[in-house]
Amino acid sequence: MHVYLFQRFITAFLTLFGMSVVIFILLRLVPGNIVDILFSSAGFVNPAAKQEIAHELGLDQSIPVQYGRWLRDIARGDLGKSYRYDIPAWQVIKPRIPVTVELAFFALLIAVILGVPVGVLSAVRQDTATDYLLRTLSLAGLSMPSFWLGMVIILFLVSWFGWIPSMTYVSPFEDFKAHVLQFLFPALAVGYRSSALIMRITRSSMLDVLREDYIRTAWAKGQREWIVVFGHALRNAMLPVVTVIGIEFAFMIGGLVVTETVFNLPGVARYLVDAILWRDYPVVQNLVMFIAIVVVVANLTVDILYGWLDPRIRYGVR
Amino acid sequence: MNRPSWRLWVCALLAVFPVSVANSAETPKPGGILNATLLEAPPSFSIHDETTISAVWPAMPCYNNLVLFDPLKKQESLDTIIPELAEKWASQDGGKSLVFFLRKDVRWHDGQPFTSKDVKHTFDTIRETPDITSKLRVNPRKLWYENVESIEAPDAQTVIFRLKRPQPSLLLMLASGYSPIYPAHVPVAELRPKCLGTGPFKLKEYRQGELIEMVKNPDYFVKGRPYLDGIRYTIIKDRGTRYSALQAGRQDIAFIWEVAKTISETTKHAVPQLVLVETSTNVNDHIIVNFRRPMFKDPRIWKAINLAVDRKGYIQAGRQGAAIIGGILLPRPYGVWGLPEEEQRKLPGFGDPVKQKAEAKKLLAEAGYGPSNPLKFAVSTRAIPTYVDIASYVIDQLKQVGIEATLEQVETGVWHPKMSRGEFEVALNLTGIGPDDPDANFYENFRCGSIRNYPDYCNPEVDSLIEKESQTLDQKKRLALVREIDKRLQLEGARLMLGWSKEYVLMWPYVKNLVPHQSIYNYGRMQEVWLNK
Amino acid sequence: MNVSTAGSSVEPATTLRRHNLGENLFLFCREKPLGALAALLLLLMVLAAAFAETLATYDPIRTDAQHTLAPPDWAHWFGTDNLGRDIYSRIIYGARVSLAVGIASSFLGAVFGGIIGVISGYFGGWFDLMTQRIMDILQGLPLLVLAMVMAAALGPSIGNVIVAISVPIIPRAQRVIRGSVLAIREFAYIEAARALGIGHLAIAFRHILPNTVGPFIVLMTAQFGSAILVEAALSFLGLGVPEPYPSWGRMLSVSAAEFAQKAPWMVLFPGTAISLVVFASNLLGDAVRDKLDPRLRGA
């Protein structure tokens, strides 16, 4: 187990390091000088200000030095300055993090609550009408653009109930009910898609396990269906599912980006879109790095969980 | 008594007392928070640095002007100018000096007293005199004050504007929402991320890109104002969501611009008790060609572009009927200076669309373009739904005369600098002018070298004509001059005018005293607004 | 996700070899009717896009000020939008953009990923190790985020959008291909061929490559759906293919949402088009995968 963990940590660290290089290079792909773009987009007009920006960004130094500076800043927690808002980027990002985290959490929760039972049901009732119906619904979930789903939900709410959730962030301490409602619908929009994936994995994983000998034995012994299913099969089927949940987290970020835009939630993902559209490149760079860190940590957590769950790894059997 | 007569008594009573009933319903009640909507995050709070309503609307409650257009009067003019920081003013020296007598009891939000030094500082900074302490980043309206020779502050309550020559428009420009007074003791750069003024509201919180919250200024110099406890501006970029929010009661008033007639009508239809006010905006849509580019040195090209676009179609499709045709200045019935419709229709581009398109094709052929060698360029526009739509419409019109155009969408923050630097070929632009005034419009947009003169149009003859009208005191003579300039600018392609947009401001009926003016830039102070809830 | 472990106990995927192409297709239709249906649907869409000029009833960018926001009727089968443009024609032409971007980017991504996967899997060693780390890194960044940054950096044009979407696909593609290469590499007959002195290139072409066709097809159909969705999202956010050429994603942004209450057809048709194409692609992908390589089931 310890060897496994150690390996995983090293891999995660190296991956992050590599990601930083990729991100750094990506942003240098921008046609034209970053300084020029920032200079004009921030509304400056005098060249003296341009010199200032160049110096602030350290662009008057060589690339490796710039890269080193950037890494050092990130390690220190300095996410640079937003030229759009003229204040440190961290100040802009900090209040938005809990929003995105909460949305992601609820979406994942919905995805698991919807996906796992449906997957189990589908597997147990394989090739029946129920199975086909559920598989079609879940495939539909994978096929719909999540922003479209969000739009349709809002349209539906306004047309039928004359109501939409709050368009400004409502803190749970302020008004718990409004807060829940505010996050419910976007979480549904994002979660539906993730639930589809989880449902499919659960189903196929369950199918594999259900074929195993020890399950047949349990049947033969006359154990009741649900005990067999939940007691034995599910536990063993969960391993790949857990892995997928971790991976799905990364996939979900794309859905978060568009959903936060449609539902006007002030999260990190939406801020990324705004920063890109406003050409606030230093912020974009740091935000993407931030997202990368989150993804790697999530995967690492999943790996650790997997390691703990899978007895082969836990007890060091090769 | 038989029944009908008690009804008669009731009616009689009501007939006698309706005045008092109406009056008691109209006595302003203090309290409440106004939920207003913003289209986009303001580029900054520094009004003097900005050119967009997205900056002026949320920042106006924070500041005061020397003078202001009466918020309760829809039509703005010299007659509706009321005092704010200046109690009285007078014109001296045959119009070459404008003296303002300032209030004594005003404090900045940080407690410092307001004096004439602040006024001098503000306008010296805009004029970029050599002795200023901090510089504005952009300063788009520097030319508004070109005629000011110097500003004197002989004592704490007096300010004198010494002009090079008389300028009737100066007072109008000072009354616009674009002319707040800045504090002399705060560097201008600090007024970008936050506002610090003398106004009825103070900035309480700014959640970047999300929300601006203003709170009542308890020490405001007008006793009993403001009525509201605060204002919350929510930034909702998506127009559909904005209207859904209004419909659902989460917002009290929609944003006053970029409205789209259809949506406001649909919303009103769904919620009949909403109040819908039709008004003009003092914003016009037009096409500009970049005279810096070699392809536009040939006037046939931009003339062809002008002829290709059907103005009626622009109004119906691009603006859903919510626009009127007009020239360089706002036409009647909303404005005072614009060309009358019959004269505007005689200008190229406003005639029969079929004939015009044929003529455009001919011009292009003469210039060497045709089906085998089509003219190609990019049409840039702001990434706002209405403008993307209008630009799509224009591109379709251009296609019908054989021009292949593509659309380039540019975010607002990047738009103005990009235009100033001439980084475009053809642009679908819109310009709003603070007050309905020829000086403000001409100086800002058409003078050689103005930072807002995006096409880089320059004609010294027209410049001297502008100089002339600016100092003409006789109203009739001035009007004639202004109209002549209007026509010339259009004929020389300084702007290919499309139209002046109308807006449909929607708000809930309990929002009182928020009277839309014919210009969107001058009524955002919110001092008189109250909620009947 | 690839759940294949050491698969040397399974026969190489030579099921393709037993019948010729025609017979394979027939079997496919019979065994997987849904998949065949999906394939047909996709083919129809591609044909519609190819013959857009004939099938469309109007010029997609032609505005019509007299008939804005018209509900579906005989003149305009899917109604018109707020500029009076015919929605049906825009969907047909939009198919071009969406399908072209989808096919091009998933193909490019799959090809490049495939090549990297084959080389990496076959040669192994430190090259493999390095490549895998780099691929992990690229894959770690969420698809849409990476595509967004690339599209913004490169600028808005159809070519750039294709590149921007194909780059995130490369690591996902190479992982699948590499997996199957690894499996095949262990087979005895490969060893034998090497022993006989047959060159790497010959082995690669004659033995390895044909066996990757199955996974490749599965891969492409899987990624095609993703690519379309990413393009739609990019267009929705304003980073995709620029105006005035119609794109399904862009038809859903901006105006559609706001006029949705008055003219719901503006929102319903483009969204349905996207969903249908992706749905068909997913169905097809499932069917192909079931037939060709049951080991990959569950991925």
Image (tube, rainbow, N blue to C red):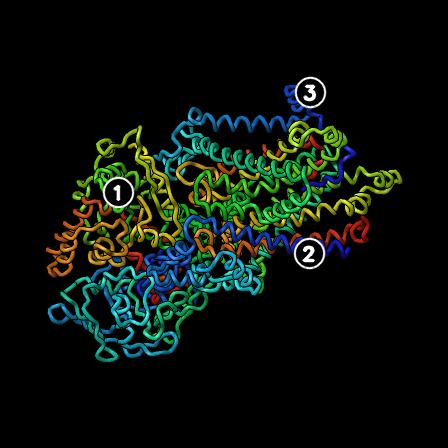
The part of the image, by quadrant, that contains residue A198 is top right
> Which callout, 1 or 3, points to the residue nearer the camera?
1
Q: Is residue B424 above or below residue A2?
A: above
Disc 1 to disc 3, how far (Cα)? 65 Å
The part of the image, by quadrant, that contains residue C221 is top right
Residue, disc 1: B294
Disc 1 to disc 2, how far (Cα)? 60 Å
Q: Nearer the viewer, residue B225 or C111?
A: C111
Q: Is residue B137 visible?
A: yes
Circle 2 SS class: helix
Chain label for disc 1: B
Q: Is residue C212 visible?
A: no
Residue B265 placement (x, y as % from top left): 38, 46
Amino acid at the residue labelled 2:
Phe
Circle 3 SS class: loop
Residue, disc 3: C19
